[in-house]
Image (tube, rainbow, N blue to C red):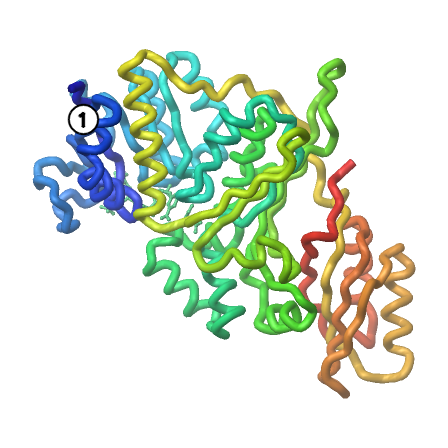
Amino acid sequence: MKRLRVGLLGCGNVGAGLVALLGEQRAVIAARTGIELEISRIAVRSASKDRGLPMAPSVFCDSAADVVTDPEIDVVVEVIGGIEPARTLLRQAIDAKKPVVTANKELLANHGAELFGAADEVGVDLLFEAAVAGAIPLIRPLRESLAAEPLQRIMGIVNGTTNYILTQMSEHGAGFDEALSEAQSLGYAESDPSADVEGFDAAAKAAIIATVAFGVEVVAGDVYHEGITRITPHDIEMARRLGFTVKAVAVAERATVIDSDDPGLPEVAVRVHPAMVPLQHPLAGVRDSFNAVFVQGDAVGELMFYGRGAGGRPTAGAVLGDLVDAAVNLSSGASGRIGRLAPARIRSIDDLRTAYYLSLEVADKPGVLASVAAVFGRHGVSIRSMQQHGLGDDARLVFITHQCRERDLRATQRDLSGLREVHELGNVIRVIGEESRPR
Ligand code: NDP
Ligand code: HSE
């Protein structure tokens, strides 16, 4: 029986979940792989804190660098989060030829190319299944099973916290703040939850998805993102009346089919935003902290991945899977390489074509609807449906458009806000199921 010593960096929601899960599964893993995995050192911020874990106090320390450079440590698992010191620690581990497992999407979405390149160069594993969509096996299928598939589009719900909040608001009439604190206490949210609710976390995941799926270098800053903080109970109620539900979605797509005879620069469009999802769409049924991702390929058609997108124990399951993989590879002298990443052109959100929901508070007077409709017409935005709710000064017009270009919708929005009859311009929300791929 081979014994591999694991250095664990971070022991919060995910790290503590990993300690517990490995304790339960150690014998099964050993029987299957012939490798005994032992977490021999754990670095945390406060080493003296009682974590209620079955580990000797001497295992804990407050210097992650000491754990990484300890010659007794064979494999490093990083579940601290954030860019630094995680980036430096992972570089140290890789340079010392130690395989690394991480759940850190923020780091990979900003410095992935550097770290993947370093790992490839020395031939060690850098595995990150848990970084995208928690427990769902998505990275390995994209990277291995679908390696030869000309993937076109990946769309899904990739943030558990925001999906939990939107579910609580839609189904239980919960307030935003109340639902967010529940998500925090359930261990779903990032240490700074604005990463979740402002869309940064989903943007990082979308960048990683695009990188792995299309083999191009996409960083977090390339991803257009909007959070869910401006979604109101009114939007949620309107969505329900119109046959939709509001979800936060991530979309990564190729703007052009890459012709192998003429490689050119691949063009990709990657975005994260709230969306009106038709109630009959499979994403509409994805509730609470669950995530789901649709992968659309040329040969395979459409695939759907579904599961727990957040939470200590489910995420630890994905980390442990990577850890077993890294251990097996280490003992057999192999490593899973991410491969060469090509540069990509990023398609502007202005060029997106989709349908939109928008609502306006207007004066309920003759001629108002005609003035409003004229603005849509002037910018070539065709109205698919319109409803009026309320009367008098409280009248609200709710529109769903046909597909149009984002820049035309923005121009419409700008001109509507200048109309005297429009008292307030509500949210504009893209409608899923009506969008076309960029050409
Ligand atoms: P937590 O905030 O719960 O835990 C972070 C841990 O890191 C804590 O144990 C903390 O120590 C430790 N830590 C912080 N700074 C340092 C440092 N400088 N040196 C050593 N240890 C340090 O985070 P999570 O477990 O929720 O998340 C960890 C990672 O996993 C993040 O990258 C996150 O994005 C990712 N992730 C999280 C998921 C989830 O559902 N929670 C799902 C998927 C990915 P101390 O305990 O002493 O404060
Ligand atoms: N905060 C993240 C989420 C954790 O809610 O999805 C999983 O990556």
Position of 128 with respect to 412 (left or right) is: left
Residue 223 visible at all: no
The amino acid sitting under disc 1 is Glu
Name the residue at 77% across, 55% down: 410
Is 365 situated above or below 402? below
Q: Is mark 1 within 8 Å of ligand 1?
A: no
Residue nearer the viewer, 398 or 37: 37
Reply above or below: 401 against 259.
below
Which x, y percent locates residue 256?
74, 30
Q: Which residue is depicted at the point 34% across and 20% down?
A: 94
**Residue 352 lies in quadrant:** top right
The image shows residue 420 at horizontal and vertical percentages of: 82, 75
Residue shown at 74% from the left, 41% from the top: 437
Say which quadrant the N terminus sits in.
top left
Residue 344 image point, x, y percent: 65, 26
Above or below 390: residue 168: above
The residue labelled by disc 1 is 36
Please state, as top left, top right, bottom left or bottom right, where the C terminus lies in the image.
top right
> Measured along the vertical axis of the image, is residue 439 above or below residue 149?
below
- What residue sits 30% from the left and 29% below the top? 323
Secondary element under disc 1, as helix, strand or loop, is strand
Q: Residue furthest bottom?
A: 392
Label 1: how many Cα within 10 Å (few below 14, some 14–19, many 20+): some
Number of numbered discs overlaid on the protein picture: 1
Instruction: Residue 294: give x, y in percent of width and height.
Output: 58, 43
Residue 95 is left or right of residue 386, and the answer is: left
Nearer to us in this view, 106 or 259: 259
Q: Nearer the viewer, residue 411 or 398?
A: 398
Side of 292 where 70 appears, left or right: left
Tell me if I can see residue 407 in this picture. yes
